[in-house]
Amino acid sequence: MAKKLISVTVNGKLEERAVEPRTLLIHFLREELNLTGAHIGCETSHCGACTVDVDGVSVKSCTHLAVQCDGAHVTTVEGLANKGVLHAVQEGFYKEHGLQCGFCTPGMLMRASNFLKENPNPSEDEIRMGMSGNLCRCTGYQNIVKAVQYAARKLQEAPAA
Amino acid sequence: MIPPKFDYHAPKSVAEAVALLEQLGSEAKLLAGGHSLLPMMKLRFAQPEHLIDLNRIPELRGICLDGDTVVIGAMTVENELIASEVLRERVPLLGEAARLIADPQVRNRGTIGGDIAHGDPGNDHPALSLVCDAQFVLQGPNGRRTVDAHGFFLGTYMTQLEESEVMVAIRIPSFATHSGWAYEKLKRKTGDWATAGCAVVLRRSGDVVSHIRIGLTNVAPTALRAEAAEQALLGQPFTDENIARAVAAAIAITDPADDLRGDPEYKTAMAGVMVKRALNTAWARSA
Ligand SMILES: Cc1cc2nc3c(=O)[nH]c(=O)nc-3n(C[C@H](O)[C@H](O)[C@H](O)COP(=O)(O)OP(=O)(O)OC[C@H]3O[C@@H](n4cnc5c(N)ncnc54)[C@H](O)[C@@H]3O)c2cc1C
Ligand code: FES
Ligand code: FES
């Protein structure tokens, strides 16, 4: 059960570590790299709290092995803001009250930012479908949808944020 | 929850993966999208000593045409099925049904090959491949063989796939003109497996059904092809009476498990509802 050496670019920074093959990406991020933004919710790939980007696509990091990320680019919620300026989805969740306890929010933000790349001008139905892998237990989805709509408008006005 | 310990292998070709399977025997498992296997490992339902990751084998991905047959690499993920123009034109059922599988993140990882090879009666691709007359290309130590979807599913988690074989591709003939198709899936929430599901592909000649396949999801230990139900409509006009005979014949072969999605009686009734809806949608589209 030898450890494997992996190099992963996380939020723009190259990280080299020896990992046990069974180490899940979520534990690698939280425990090896101290990036505790991505949360562990259900651990069974249902809730989406652990969502991060791996090579540009949304992935549930509780169901992905760290060794599989050798050579990959990973973005977590810590990498979303640009030099202290909130990403449009972060601003949207803040302005539209898209969170209460905040537990689901890192996953929501990562999924929303990726979804708006897939579909920059979505309908409400498309937002609900695109965000359907993320559960929220307290805010309710109304304001989350509004937050994504806010971000979509903002990104359309000022592209390449 | 962390999976049990294992050694990790990342072959670069199918031949290399097959060689590893042969060498490591029953202690090894293939890792595709990991969205069935890793959860099972976390729960200790599976404890392979070796995982052979298929993700670094480019030849296993992508969708192309071989004459009139659509060839889908086993490692093609659900979201690629949804996005595929070739599928939309040739086998529109597949992308449409893939939208009903799991959720966006899972669809970025879960593969069509893994969904089929897993042999889980709750998975949607087995019934879909039955109604599409799909064939599976399997590569083992003695080369490749091609098997029909019909007859491939032997029991829960049991298929014709041998221990040292890799599923390489799924081959599906393009739908003929005047085909209609539908996948009806009852689920409790987005991202859930089916309480009951029904896939239909049919063809119309005038007022008569000239070709028909009916497949059922999650109402028996394997996906089912409802052949007696097909016979109730084949060569017949699409009347309420014939639809009712088909529904009754489909219901007769179900054997659903009692679980949180419902008891057998409920699931059987819902299977009937799904069959009727899928038949009606498919017929309406076949005009
Ligand atoms: C929250 C959630 C919801 C889901 N909902 C649905 C749903 O609604 N419908 C549905 O159909 N599925 C659903 N799934 C299952 C999901 O689609 C899985 O991705 C799929 O069942 C397995 O595909 P995989 O690529 O992830 O395979 P893996 O989990 O990697 O592998 C599954 C099994 O197949 C074997 N295998 C994989 N690829 C090959 C190959 N090429 N050749 C030979 N053997 C192979 C593996 O060894 C393993 O035994 C859901 C999963 C989750 C986590
Ligand atoms: S913790 Fe990964 S999906 Fe819930
Ligand atoms: S804000 Fe509390 S779970 Fe979503």
Image (spheres, coloured by chain):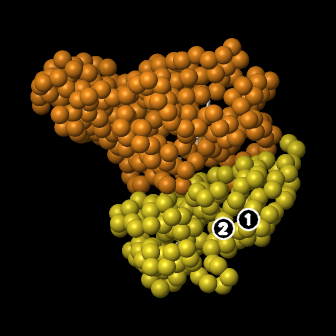
Q: Which residue does the image show at 85% across and 42% down from the upper left?
A: A1
Per the rendering, the mark at residue B215 is none
Residue A111 visible from this viewpoint: no
Please name whichever residue, B121 or A85, is drawn nearer the observer in this view of the structure.
A85
Q: Which residue does the image show at 62% across and 17% down from the upper left?
A: B144
Chain B: colour as depicted? orange
Please name whichever residue, A86 or B147, is drawn nearer the observer in this view of the structure.
A86
Coordinates of residue B150 in the picture (x, y in percent): 43, 20
Query: Tags 1 and 2 in contact by the CB under 8 Å rule?
Result: yes
Chain A: colour as depicted? yellow
The chain letter under disc 1 is A
Tell me the kind of residue under disc 2. Answer: Thr
Per the rendering, the mark at residue A10 is 1
User: Height in image: A70 above or below B135?
Assistant: below
- Dot 1 falls on a residue whose secondary structure is strand
Q: Which residue does the image show at 78% across and 38% down from the upper left?
A: B9
Residue at the disc numbered 2: A76
